[in-house]
Amino acid sequence: MSVERLLEGNARFVSEVFQDGSKFADCLKGQSPHTLVIACADSRVPPELIFGAKPGEIFVHRNIGNMVPPGDWNLATVMEYAVCHLGVTTVAVLGHGRCGAIKAVASYHGHDAYIPGWIYHGHQAYVSLVERMPYPDDATAQVEWLCELEKENVRFQLKHLRTYPVITTALAANKISVVGLYYDMATGIVSKVEE
Ligand SMILES: [Zn+2]
């Protein structure tokens, strides 16, 4: 059963990792993460692991497709707490390769209740990319095109980020910077997405 796998994994964590490090003792004193990462919920994209971060270093919000929907109460609360109370100095939107959500943004044919409405937040990125780079016929080129869409989606989510007063106020006061990042699943390398 999954829960047994979880608890066995936790027992390994306690004996192999937790016992051996002051980093967890420091967590008892509180947290002061330097960055808020908005990432995809994809199980292959664990932010702390990718950034080599210790517990307490990064504050994480994850959802399907690393979306920043304008007016999202859940994300707004995370951003308000991270920026106004924890004092993060960077807000990063992290896209990634082989993203199922972004593939669905390009071609969704299902009948789910919630998924279509959510991935619609990536629709502007799709329209923008199709205008300057039509979807190719060649299979290899299609993979590259989807990588471009994953990056274009990050750019549009950064635009959405700037619709939140908590972000625009902190930007105007030079308290934070915002950045787009992209995780290449084939190499492990994270690179900046230029806006
Ligand atoms: Zn994804």
Image (cartoon, rainbow, N blue to C red):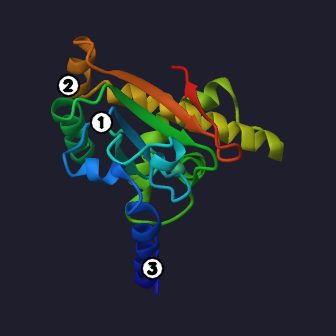
User: Which element is circle 3 on?
Assistant: helix
From the top left corner, tell me how far across and down residue 88 is, in percent.
28, 30
Is residue 170 visible to us here? yes
Assess mark 2: CB under 8 A from ligand 1? Answer: no
User: Which element is circle 2 on?
Assistant: helix
Query: Depth check: 178 or 4 in front?
Result: 4
Is residue 65 visible to us here? no
Query: Depth check: 47 or 52 in front?
Result: 52
Q: What residue type is labelled 1?
A: Pro
On screen, residue 183 above or below 64:
above
From the top left corner, tell me how far across and down residue 23 is, in percent.
35, 49
Q: What residue type is labelled 3?
A: Glu
Which label sits on residue 165?
A: 2
N-terminal label among 1 and 2:
1
Do callouts 3 and 2 mark residues in contact (Cβ within 8 Å)?
no
Residue for point 75% across, 42% down: 142
Crowd rating for badge 2 (residues with CA inside 10 Å; few <14, some 14–19, many 20+): few
From the top left corner, tell me how far across and down residue 39 is, in percent.
44, 44
The residue that mark 1 highlights is 70
Residue for point 36% across, 27% down: 90
The residue that mark 3 highlights is 8
Crowd rating for badge 3 (residues with CA inside 10 Å; few <14, some 14–19, many 20+): few
N-terminal label among 3 and 1:
3
139 to the left or right of 168: right
Q: What residue type is labelled 2?
A: Pro
Residue for point 41% across, 45% down: 54
Gap between marks 3 and 1, in whole Å?
40 Å
On screen, residue 6 above or below 120:
below
On screen, residue 44 above or below 69:
below
66 to the left or right of 137: left
From the top left corner, tell me how far across and down residue 104 is, in percent.
56, 52
